[in-house]
């Protein structure tokens, strides 16, 4: 019996106007790297899982299928590029129908079995299975799939990013207990967030990963899990939302105890579908506010944020599989050409955003800041929010100071004050940091430099001079230790530690 599955979490129902598209016509311009691809299954032993159609009481650790796209500089002449069918076989596996004959794929799952869709299965992609791993490190993007969707739903975008120097990891969107979501969507949202965090851990094990440069990208329901993951993981440096459900289901996102819009403090870009026509709103009983309301974006203040609206894309076409295989809705969908052009533009926005945020690429930043959308008004409109002045913390100062081996700290401090006039360095923080460094055999001189800066900043602190004396004493510089303890006593004659240290040093 044919199985029917829910492809999209949101609203969209399609009638049978068949798409005429191809990967070649989308025309994504790959970068300088070849694209390698690997697919594997890992297991999360902290959670349990059961397969629906096995009709068994067997419980296993939670399986996490992982698709990985990565840059490669050398491609063996023996390798052949993957076909779309190779990706659809992964879809079969993740739907737990791995033994289904290939010829049944289009009958069994989401997409109509039409001649054009059959042709898609034979199209060549730009990825090569198990291509050679090099030695270079690359920034990492973790992709969160849409509602109950496959890890490969956006394979063309993932290949495109890998060709431009990114490692991309993705896993399917699965329910907490089984392949299917329950009716408790807050629970399933948390489950996907945990799956995304599992991928973050796996990214740390992948040899090409530059693990201090990690971003997340979520499509549809995956946008919720991506935001929760970002909120509780400081390793995440940027966030892309492909028509993410956070726009439509803010109340659901707010049910997470880990969500706080103030914690969305990394660059964020949300790419939204076109406005839904009035007749579709009425026929499908959709609240018209959906076209205009975006509570999360309106609440952001701690990071630069970009809001894009693609005037030729409905929700499904933010994924490769949607562009290639999905039926069109004649009530609102645009032409295949406009859909493919918009998908290409969306992919280029994603690439430039990640180039700007993970690679500090000025061309990527210019692409975003110069509002490319102004030259493509028929396809896209854009709104940008600047981050309010971020608070500058002692941790920020220390990160900068450590990069210069704690030298020229006064100059650094003056430069920071020009940008952040209200910044203050707590005396106690300097005292603790100085002691941590001075007692570390790898960098004791750095601790002395911190204390010398500290006593210039707090010249009347008996405690800082006392700690400076301890540092000099630890390093065997007795004359400097004596001078420091004497200065501490001058400021606070009752300093018992300084009195004892001076007695020891003068014997």
Image (cartoon, rainbow, N blue to C red):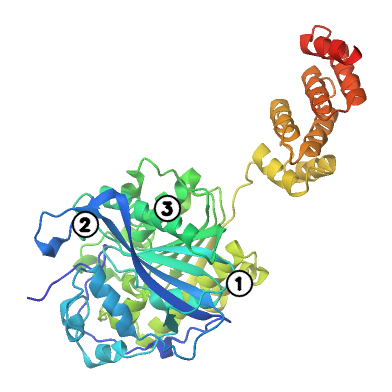
Note whether 320 is above or below 494 in the view shown.
Answer: below
Q: Which quarter of the image is occupied by the C terminus?
A: top right
Comes first in the chain, label 1 or label 2: 2
Closer to the camera: disc 3 or disc 2? 2
Instruction: Tell whether 181 sits left or right of 407.
Output: left
Q: Can you see residue 399?
A: yes
In the displayed structure, does residue 200 sit left or right of residue 49?
Answer: right
User: Which residue ends up furthest to the top in the rendered image?
Assistant: 494
Residue at coordinates 65% horizontally, 72% vertically from top-left? Answer: 363
Marker disc for residue 312: none
The earlier-in-sequence mark between 3 and 2 is 2
State which quadrant residue 196 falls in: bottom left
**In front of the other: label 1 or label 3?**
3
Label 1: which secondary element: helix
Name the foreground residue: 29 vs 49. Answer: 49
Mark 1 and mark 3 residues within 8 Å of each other at the beta carbon: no
Give how far across and how far down residue 487 sits, in percent.
88, 17
């Amino acid at each position: 019996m044919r199985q029917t599955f829910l492809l999209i979490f949101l609203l969209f129902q399609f009638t049978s106007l068949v798409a005429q598209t191809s990967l070649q016509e989308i025309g994504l311009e790959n970068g300088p790297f070849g694209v390698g691809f690997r697919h594997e299954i890992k297991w999360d032993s902290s959670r349990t899982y059961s397969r629906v159609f096995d009709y068994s009481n067997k419980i296993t650790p939670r399986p996490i299928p992982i698709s990985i796209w990565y840059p490669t500089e050398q491609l063996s002449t023996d390798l052949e590029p993957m076909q779309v069918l190779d990706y659809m076989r992964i879809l079969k596996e993740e739907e737990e129908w791995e033994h289904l004959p290939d010829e049944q794929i289009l009958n069994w799952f989401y997409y109509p079995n039409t001649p054009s869709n059959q042709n898609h299965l034979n199209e060549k992609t730009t990825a090569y299975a198990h291509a050679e791993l090099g030695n270079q490190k690359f920034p990492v993007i973790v992709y969160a799939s849409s509602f109950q969707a496959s890890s490969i739903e956006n394979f063309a975008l993932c290949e495109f990013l890998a060709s431009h120097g990114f490692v991309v990891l993705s896993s399917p969107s699965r329910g907490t207990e089984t392949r299917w979501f329950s009716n408790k969507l807050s629970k399933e949202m948390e489950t996907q967030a945990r799956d995304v965090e599992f991928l973050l851990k796996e990214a740390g094990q992948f040899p090409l990963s530059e693990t201090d440069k990690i971003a997340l990208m979520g499509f549809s329901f995956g946008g919720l899990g991506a935001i929760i993951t970002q909120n509780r993981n400081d390793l995440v440096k940027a966030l892309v939302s492909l028509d993410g459900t956070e726009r439509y289901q803010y109340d659901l996102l707010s049910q997470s105890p880990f969500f706080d819009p103030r914690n969305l403090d990394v660059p964020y870009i949300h790419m939204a579908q076109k406005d839904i026509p009035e007749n579709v709103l009425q026929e499908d009983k959709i609240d018209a506010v959906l076209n205009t309301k975006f509570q999360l974006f309106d609440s952001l203040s701690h990071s630069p944020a970009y809001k894009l609206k693609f005037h030729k894309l409905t929700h499904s076409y933010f994924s490769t599989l949607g562009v290639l295989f999905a039926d069109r809705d004649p009530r609102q969908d645009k032409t295949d050409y406009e859909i493919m052009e918009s998908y290409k533009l969306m992919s280029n926005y994603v690439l430039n955003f990640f180039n700007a945020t993970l690679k500090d690429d000025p061309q990527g930043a210019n692409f975003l800041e110069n509002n490319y959308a102004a030259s493509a008004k028929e396809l896209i409109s854009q709104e940008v929010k600047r981050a309010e002045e971020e608070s500058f913390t002692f941790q920020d100062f220390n990160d900068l100071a450590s990069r210069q081996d704690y030298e020229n700290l006064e100059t650094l401090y003056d430069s920071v004050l020009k940008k952040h006039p209200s910044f203050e360095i707590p005396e106690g923080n300097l005292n603790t940091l100085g002691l941590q460094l001075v007692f570390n055999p790898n960098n004791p001189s750095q601790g002395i430099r911190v204390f010398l800066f500290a006593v210039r900043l707090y010249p009347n602190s008996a405690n800082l001079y006392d700690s400076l004396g301890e540092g000099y004493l630890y390093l065997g510089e007795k004359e400097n230790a004596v001078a420091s303890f004497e200065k501490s006593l001058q400021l606070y004659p009752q300093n018992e530690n300084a009195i004892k240290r001076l007695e020891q040093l003068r014997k």
